[in-house]
Image (spheres, coloured by chain):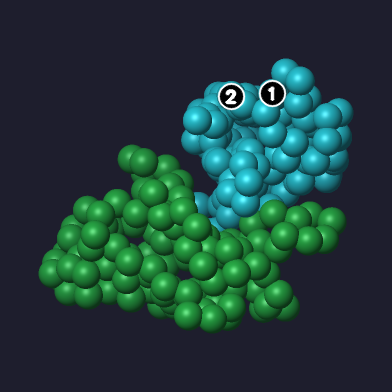
Chain colours: A green, B cyan
Amino acid sequence: DAGVIQSPRHEVTEMGQEVTLRCKPISGHNSLFWYRQTMMRGLELLIYFNNNVPIDDSGMPEDRFSAKMPNASFSTLKIQPSEPRDSAVYFCASSSHSGVNSYEQYFGPGTRLTVT
Amino acid sequence: ELKVEQNPLFLSMQEGKNYTIYCNYSTTSDRLYWYRQDPGKSLESLFVLLSNGAVKQEGRLMASLDTKARLSTLHITAAVHDLSATYFCAVGRANKLIFGTGTLLAVQP
């Protein structure tokens, strides 16, 4: 398996622009998670989906952030408009509800976002 | 609210020495995970601990879980430079994982 795939790996954009981050989870996994990591705040869970349905979006910082999962193999995290304080590394992770290591999360390589 | 605390936050070790990282959590859970993150990289799963008394070992790392004490430990034996990284514990809550703050481990020659 290719693991969790994220794109782009790096994104540099200007304040006010729309940013879309993409994630392809591991095939067969039921849950998908979006995290943000910064030096100041550490690793924060933004939102997660079970079977393509958003379950908990309490970590989404504000209305500028939105996430979708239109099917089991694709999710997006969108920031509109972007601000410099959104600069961070955004990770996507997926997990399965079954198997020996159920609920173990597998992380993608991350997208490093810089907003100038 | 489930809280996960790791200590120490930063650990500077000499090669060949032993040390332990501690992970305490505030409410009941029967699933605990340890991850490693190298600088500029993603998180890599190290251990999955699913029951009280579980112990797992991989090379110089050994993890254990005491669900009654709500404590997990990650023991490092005879540290080598390649172990330098940030180590996170994470506790299962429903489908989510609640992560600790991480321990930055620096192994000095």
Q: Report which quarter residue B13 is drawn in.
A: top right
> Which three-letter amino acid code belongs to the residue tagged 1?
Arg
Mark 2, other Cα within 10 Å: few <14 / some 14–19 / many ≥20? some
Q: Are marks 2 and 1 in contact (CB under 8 Å)?
A: yes
B106 versus A101 height, above or below: above
- Left or right: residue A85 versus residue B29 is left
Residue B87 at least partly seen: no
- The residue pinned by badge 1 equals B70
Instruction: State the residue at coordinates (60%, 69%).
Output: A51
Chain containing mark 2: B
> Which three-letter amino acid code belongs to the residue tagged 2?
Ser
Q: Where does the image place residue A14, in percent across and percent down from the top left? A: 16, 71
Q: Quadrant of the C terminus of chain A?
A: bottom left
Q: Where does the image place residue A97, in percent across and percent down from the top left? A: 72, 60
| In the foreground, A29 or A44 | A29
Instruction: State the residue at coordinates (55%, 41%).
Output: B98
A87 versus B25 height, above or below: below
Q: Which mark is residue B39?
A: none
Q: Where does the image place residue A36, in percent across and percent down from the top left? A: 41, 54
Chain containing mark 1: B
- The residue pinned by badge 2 equals B26
- Left or right: residue B108 versus residue A64 is right
Q: Earlier in the sequence, mark 2 or mark 1?
A: 2
| In the foreground, B73 or A34 | A34
Q: Where does the image place residue B63, in percent across and percent down from the top left? A: 78, 35
- Left or right: residue B100 versus residue B68 is left
Residue A74 at least partly seen: yes
Instruction: State the residue at coordinates (75%, 46%).
Output: B47
